Structure formats: structure tokens, C-alpha cells
Amino acid sequence: MTDPGMREALDRATSMRAEMNAIRDRMADAELVGSAAGGAVRVRVNAIGEYRSVRIDPEVYEAGREEVEDAVLAALRDVTVQLREIGERRMSDLQDVFNGIAPGFMPPR
């Protein structure tokens, strides 16, 4: 016979896993765009860090190789800041999930 405490712990773990999977799915679907040069350079990435595309408008090339490289780097930095911010929000979401399922499981941030 299953111990009621063990069954409750298993139910919590199952619920926690489902919540974590849901958060990951939402992050995989969320798209971020880093941009530079007034939007002429754009880098698309999902919220779990999978880069999707880079778009460089033709007029950027006229500025020269170094300018193109600088603009791409700036767009990457822009999207990295966004990734960091969304990661922090998701960690807060996870903390709420853990605390809802197992109060005191995770220390406060």
C-alpha cells in the first residue's frame, strides 16, 4: 500500500514537472528580436536561446565591413539582454511554481 505522504510527494513532483514543461514550451514559442542600426540589422531568437535568423538590410553593407560587424554585434547584445531578462522572469515563475507545490522548497530570491 502506498504511503499517503509518498503519494502526495509524487503528485507534487508530477505537477511540478508539468508546470516546468509548460514554461519551457512557452519559452520555445516566444520570439525575441535584437536590433541595431535603426532596425536595419535584426537577430531573431526564441526565449530558450535558439537563434532563428539574422536579417541585414542591404544599405548596411554600404557602410563597410566593420560597420556591418559592429551592427551585428550590437543586435546580438540587444537580444542577449532580452534573453537575460526573460530568463530572470521565468526563474521567478519557477520559484512561484515550486513554492505553490512545496512551500519553502526554494529559498527566496
Image (tube, rainbow, N blue to C red):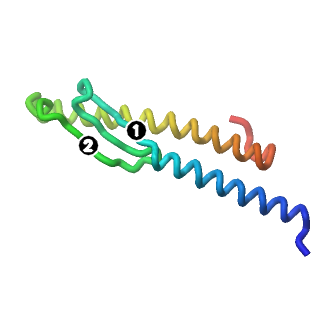
The residue under the point 36% across, 34% down is 77
The residue under the point 11% across, 28% down is 63
Q: Residue furthest left?
A: 62
The residue under the point 51% across, 37% down is 86
| Residue 32 coordinates in the image, percent (x, y) | 40, 38
| Residue 67 coordinates in the image, percent (x, y) | 17, 30
Is 9 placed left or right of 34 in the picture?
right
Q: Residue furthest bottom?
A: 1
Q: Which class describes the residues within 10 Å of circle 2: few (<14), some (14-19), or many (20+)? A: some
Q: Which class describes the residues within 10 Å of circle 1: few (<14), some (14-19), or many (20+)? A: many
Q: Amino acid at mark 1?
A: Leu
Residue at image mark 2: 54
| Residue 1 coordinates in the image, percent (x, y) | 91, 75
Query: Which callout, 2 or 1, points at the residue further toward the start of the chain?
Result: 1
Q: Secondary structure at mark 1?
A: strand
The residue under the point 22% across, 30% down is 40
Residue at image mark 1: 32
In 3D space, how far apart are the residues under numbered discs 2 and 1 (Cα atoms)? 12 Å
Q: Amino acid at mark 2?
A: Val
